[in-house]
Image (cartoon, rainbow, N blue to C red):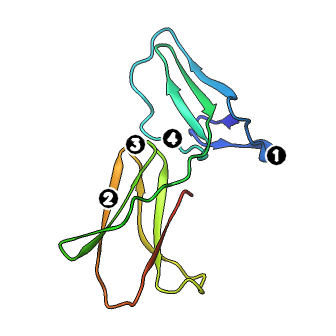
Amino acid sequence: MTCKATSSCTRPGGFVPALGDTFPVLTCGSRVGTFDALDLPAAVVASYGASSVVLSAAPVVPVEISPVSLSAGRFVLAFRSRSNQTYTIQRSDDLATSNWILFTNFTGDGGLNQFFVPVTEAPHRFFRVREP
C-alpha cells in the first residue's frame, strides 16, 4: 500500500494483501492519540501500539443481521459493525429490480447498531447492508 501525506491510500496494480500481512505506517518514540478517520479497504485494520501504527490484513467478516423484530409499530433491523468501517443500508420493494434505494449510511463503532424502520403498506420490503 502506498500512503500519501493526504492520508489517502492506494493499492498499486490491484495488490490485495494476504491474511496476516502487516504494514508498519508509523514508528515513533511515543504515540499519543489516533487518526481521526481512516479510509481503509474492508479487509485492512489499523492497530495502535505505544510507538507505532500498523495496518494488517484481516479476514473479511460478513454482516450478520439479527432476527428482525417489531417495536412500537416499527421494524428493528440490527447488526454488529466493525469500528471505522463504513456501511450503506439500502431497501427495495421488489427483488427483481436492480434499483435499490438508499436508507442510510453510517460508520461502524464496533457495537450492535439498530435501525428503526416504519411499517408501511408495502406487501413486503427488502433490505441489504453493503460495505463500500
Q: Return the residue nearer the eye: 96 or 42.
A: 96
- In primary-sequence order, the first of circles 2 and 4 is 4
- In primary-sequence order, the first of circles 4 and 3 is 4
**Quadrant showing the C terminus:** bottom right
- In primary-sequence order, the first of circles 1 and 3 is 1
**Quadrant showing the N terminus:** top right
Disc 1/disc 3 C-alpha distance (Å): 31 Å
Q: Residues within 10 Å of mark 1 (few under 14, many from 20)?
A: few
What percent of the width, then of the height, locates residue 119?
A: 28, 81
The residue singled out by tag 3 in the image is 110
Residue 114 - label: 2
Residue 38 - label: 4
The residue singled out by tag 1 in the image is 13
Above-or-below relation of 21 to 101: above
Q: Is residue 71 left or right of residue 96?
A: left
Q: Residues within 10 Å of mark 4 (few under 14, many from 20)?
A: some
Residue type at mark 2? Gln
